[in-house]
Image (cartoon, rainbow, N blue to C red):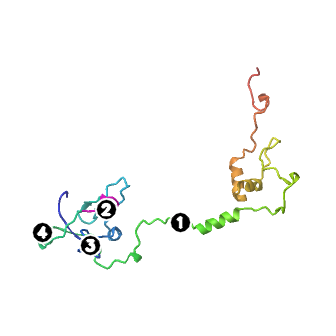
Amino acid sequence: FFGERFVLIINEAIYMPELENSLANPNQFCDFGVEVQDNPYSKDPMLIRCTDQPFVACLKSMGTMIFIDTWTPKQRDLDEYPHVVLTSPSPWNPDDVEFPNHKPVRVYDINALNSRIVKSLRIPADISDGPINSDQLKPPKSFISSKRHSNTTPEDLSEAGNISVEHAQMTLDATTKHHMRSAIMPLSRCYWMDQMY
């Protein structure tokens, strides 16, 4: 239908005679079942398409404005060109609209997030009133073990990483290799060999 003219019927569109363009809400079109693809970042072409009528209008853009070329029809145009209904003839209330295939978007509550962060912060109870002597200094936490197996507990990891004990336990479960042997020399003690050299 390239180049063909249609009379567009839009109920409750904003028409201001002093402006060159009329304003229409694409959500009102979608609510009536008209397909509107007005996302300029989409790989699909921008258009308005009726599913029950043979009508497709290619949208244009200028800056952030998205539009189609229209004109004010005269009586002869109203009589001659096919009419395309883009919105419902009944009143449209945006508060009552429920779009199909609506997937809820998870929005984070910043107050709840701050509360969780504050709860996970651990403040040491032993606060000194004056200068600290060298014998009062605690060595930094370390996970280096002089033994063959690590003795890191979920509580240690929780404190060092500022995470919950449950998350620390899950981290240890996912990263600890139980029943694995390290390759300490001589290797013949750790691995089965067919031949000795």
Q: Indicate which label's residue lies in the foreground, 3 or 2.
A: 2
Disc 1 residue type (three-letter): Val
Report, in whole angstroms, how far the alpha carbon at label 3 lies from the one at label 2. Answer: 17 Å
- For this orientation, the residue located farthest to the top is 197
Residue 107, labelled with which disc? 1
Disc 3 residue type (three-letter): Ile
Q: Quadrant of the C terminus?
A: top right
Q: Which residue is mark 3?
A: 10
Q: Could you tell me residue 148's position as x and y percent?
A: 81, 41
Report, in whole angstroms, how far the alpha carbon at label 3 lies from the one at label 1. Answer: 34 Å
Q: Indicate which label's residue lies in the foreground, 4 or 2.
A: 2
Disc 4 residue type (three-letter): Glu
**Circle 4 crowding by C-alpha within 10 Å: few under 14, some 14–19, many from 20:** few
Work out whether 92 lies above or below 151. Answer: below
Q: Could you tell me residue 191's position as x and y percent?
A: 75, 31
Q: Which residue is mark 2?
A: 66
Report, in whole angstroms, how far the alpha carbon at label 3 lies from the one at label 4. Answer: 18 Å
